[in-house]
Image: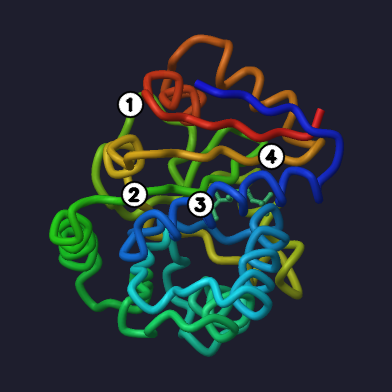
Amino acid sequence: MKIYRVKTYKEMCDKISEEFVNDIIENPSSVLGLATGSTALGIYENLINKHKQENLDFSFVKTVNLDEYIGLSNDNDQSYRYYMDNNFFNHINVKKENTFIPNGLAKDLKKECDAYDELIQKLNGIDIQLLGIGHNGHIGFNEPNNSFKKDTHVVDLHKETIEANSRFFSSIEETPTTAITLGIKNIIQAKKVILAGGEDKKEIIEKAIFGDITPEVPASILQLHENLIVVMVD
Ligand code: F6R
């Protein structure tokens, strides 16, 4: 595990986007595992700038997102598809058909989850996975639990996650309570994992990477990953 303790959110984003840029240059067909949320925004901004100013090429890249709310359409401005298109994909030259996000409107959600697992296998796994972390230690939407869920699955979001997410909705009642998320096995099988957290995540990151490995703190499983990079504001 490599840990970078940086002073500012900007430094965190610079360090992480540098990792992505180097990997994409080295392997232009990289499979990028991507996250939404506030933490990732500055990273996407940096990568867009690299594309616009230095022609960083995304045309062979494939992307796999961690999660999506159930019940929101792609044009709902709170769906993760909308977030990814507007904050990243629309500003780079990735092919839209190579950007994958679970379909939260699928009629058969179990089938959708299984198909997502198969897709990741078909892509030969994720090369570099970006992760934010919830204050409760969730990664993707793998919430604290009594066991690690391995594969892509439907999850009931915990009260604190719904409350945290409600800042983006007009009321808590409108905030989705369920989501599809990659499982822990999908995440841990990525060839490289980058865990990012701003100042407010310092405590939970330290608990996750130095505490016991337990499904009560889902991110703690990352301690077992051979190529984990933690970038945190300290
Ligand atoms: C988002 C995701 C979540 C977030 C986490 C942190 O796709 O999977 O695990 O990364 O909730 O969110 P922010 O960055 O908004 O604090």
**Quadrant of the rendered image containing residue 59:** bottom left
Q: Which mark, by number, is residue 197?
A: 4
Instruction: Please report the residue visible at 54 percent of the width from the left and 57 percent of the height from the top.
Output: 21
Q: Is mark 2 within 8 Å of ligand 1?
A: no
The residues tagged by marks 2 and 3 sit, at their Cα atoms, a distance apart of 12 Å
Question: Mark 1 or 3 closer to N-term?
Answer: 3
Q: Is mark 4 within 8 Å of ligand 1?
A: yes
The 10 Å Cα crowd at callout 3, few under 14, some 14 to 19, many 20 or more, is few
Q: Which mark, by number, is residue 147?
A: 1
User: Type of residue at label 4?
Assistant: Gly
Q: Which residue is mark 3?
A: 22
The x and y percentages for residue 110 are 19, 61
The residues tagged by marks 4 and 2 sit, at their Cα atoms, a distance apart of 20 Å
Question: Mark 2 or 3 closer to N-term?
Answer: 3
Q: Residue furthest right?
A: 7
User: Type of residue at label 1?
Assistant: Ser
Q: Please tell me which residue lies in front, 109 or 32.
A: 32
The 10 Å Cα crowd at callout 4, few under 14, some 14 to 19, many 20 or more, is many
The residues tagged by marks 3 and 4 sit, at their Cα atoms, a distance apart of 21 Å
> Dot 1: what SS?
loop
Q: Are marks 2 and 3 in contact (CB under 8 Å)?
A: no
